[in-house]
């Protein structure tokens, strides 16, 4: 975590929030997973419906105290917290993106991002896709917006392959970075897109170290709000399939071409188990393995509709957990009761008279 070049998030100065020091904090964490991110948007729409049923009508980007994301989850996190042209209103000014609009981005631009893959022998020596379309879209959406423009603390995961260290990007710390650069870093999935060169350091998709960013999000939240009683984390997965070998007959050197999937599955399982044992973290995980394997770069409309339908089903399946999380969140937003002040009347107050009487 310590990085001699970039300060790590455990040294971020505390940014006091509007709540009292001992209040609970609520964090949204979004997994990586390429086009499977459309599952997360569907789950969040269900969560928004839960909040509306409780009379809470704020946009998701203004609901939590903090948002964290990796890869496609990082793109969603930035869209929810940083103004962009995607969220522009009738006046044309950049705004926060609605969940419905986010889902349409996957449907409308997925095949543009994952266009013209490299095949044959050339694929051995280069990345599968050009970054040209991805960078053009990101720059068009965010323009000159800075990462520090996020409306609430946002943590996006990357990995510095030059230094060989995690590269968490925090909106309260990496204020020199443009939002599109942050998005480009976290979406640079190895073998799919080239790394992003940030000040001489090659940054790749944070999924290589934290596809589920919950542990890093917990540390970031604690660095800002050390006096909070509890950190509530709503962790939304992209239902990536666990990588398994069917039999010993398929086990061998060639079978390890999918080794990155083994590492990704193991890493997410480790985060899930670890989060359960952090005493002051209340961890709600929304995840179920997808029935069929859909690759992260499958941008066909049929696959995206399947993923979206699955996300809606997942949201309904986990609605009781979403309701429990929402109840705690809504309760935390209620104004704290004020201590009644005794109004001077020129006569001894009730408490003073009672103490006087007890003292006799």
Image (cartoon, rainbow, N blue to C red):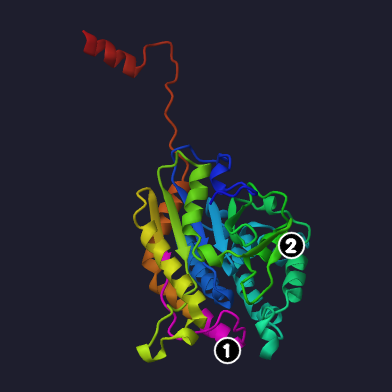
Rendered view: 313 above or below 97? below
**Cβ atoms under marks 1 and 2 closer than 8 Å:** no
* Relative height, residue 104 to residue 277 (above, below): below
Whether residue 218 sits left or right of residue 111 in the image: it is left
Other-residue count near label 2 (Cα within 10 Å), few / some / many at <14 / 14–19 / ≥20: many
The spot of residue 179 in percent (x, y) is 70, 58
Quick check: can you spot residue 153? Answer: yes
Q: Residue at x 44, y 67 (%)?
A: 268
- Outermost residue toward the front? 253
- Residue found 39% across the figure and 74% down from its top: 317
Frontmost residue, 344 versus 303: 303
Residue 308 sits inside the magenta stretch: yes
Judge by depth and name the residue closer to the eye, 18 or 242: 242
For marks 1 and 2, the one nearer the N-term is: 2
Q: Quadrant of the C terminus?
A: top left
Q: Position of residue 240 (x, y in %)?
A: 47, 76
Q: Is residue 356 magenta?
A: no
Front-most of residues 254 and 240: 254
Total marks placed: 2
Secondary structure beneath label 2: helix
Label 1 sits on a secondary structure element that is: helix
Towards the viewer: 340 or 64: 64
In the image, which disc is placed on residue 318? none
Residue at (67, 57) in percent of width and height? 82
Tell me the tag on residue 302. Answer: 1
Give the magenta-colored segment's residue range: 285-309
Which of the 4 image quarters holds residue 354?
top left
Q: Is residue 117 visible?
A: no
The numbered mark at residue 142 is 2
């Amino acid at each position: 975590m310590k990085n001699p070049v970039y300060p790590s998030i455990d040294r971020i100065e505390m940014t006091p929030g509007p709540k009292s020091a001992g209040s609970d904090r609520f964090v949204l964490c979004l997994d990586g997973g390429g086009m499977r991110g459309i599952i997360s948007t569907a789950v969040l729409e269900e969560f928004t419906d839960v909040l509306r049923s409780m009379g809470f009508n704020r946009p998701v980007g203004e609901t939590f105290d903090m948002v964290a994301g990796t890869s496609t989850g990082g793109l969603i996190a930035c869209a929810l917290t940083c103004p962009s042209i995607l969220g522009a209103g009738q006046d044309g000014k950049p705004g926060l993106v609605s969940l419905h609009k986010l889902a349409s981005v996957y449907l409308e631009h997925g095949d543009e991002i994952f266009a013209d893959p490299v095949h044959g022998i050339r694929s051995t020596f280069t990345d599968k896709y050009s970054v040209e379309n991805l960078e053009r879209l990101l720059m068009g959406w965010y323009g000159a917006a800075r990462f520090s423009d996020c409306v609430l603390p946002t943590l996006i995961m990357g990995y510095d392959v030059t230094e060989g260290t995690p590269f968490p990007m925090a909106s309260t710390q990496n204020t020199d970075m443009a939002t599109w650069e942050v998005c480009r870093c976290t979406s640079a999935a190895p073998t799919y897109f080239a790394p992003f060169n940030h000040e001489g350091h090659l940054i790749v998709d944070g999924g290589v170290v934290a596809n589920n960013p919950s542990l890093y999000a917990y540390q970031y939240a604690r660095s800002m709000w050390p006096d909070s009683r509890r950190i509530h984390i709503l962790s939304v997965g992209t239902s990536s399939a666990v990588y398994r070998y069917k039999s010993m007959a398929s086990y061998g050197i060639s079978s390890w071409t999918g080794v990155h999937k083994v590492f990704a599955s193991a890493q997410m399982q480790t985060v899930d188990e670890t989060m359960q044992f952090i005493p002051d973290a209340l961890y709600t995980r929304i995840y179920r393995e997808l029935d069929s394997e859909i690759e992260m770069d499958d941008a066909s409309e049929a696959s995206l509709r399947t993923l979206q339908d699955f996300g809606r089903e997942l949201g309904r399946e986990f609605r009781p957990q979403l309701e429990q999380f929402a109840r705690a969140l809504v309760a935390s937003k209620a104004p704290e009761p004020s201590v009644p002040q005794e109004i001077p009347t020129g006569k001894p107050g009730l408490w003073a008279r009672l103490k006087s009487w007890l003292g006799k």
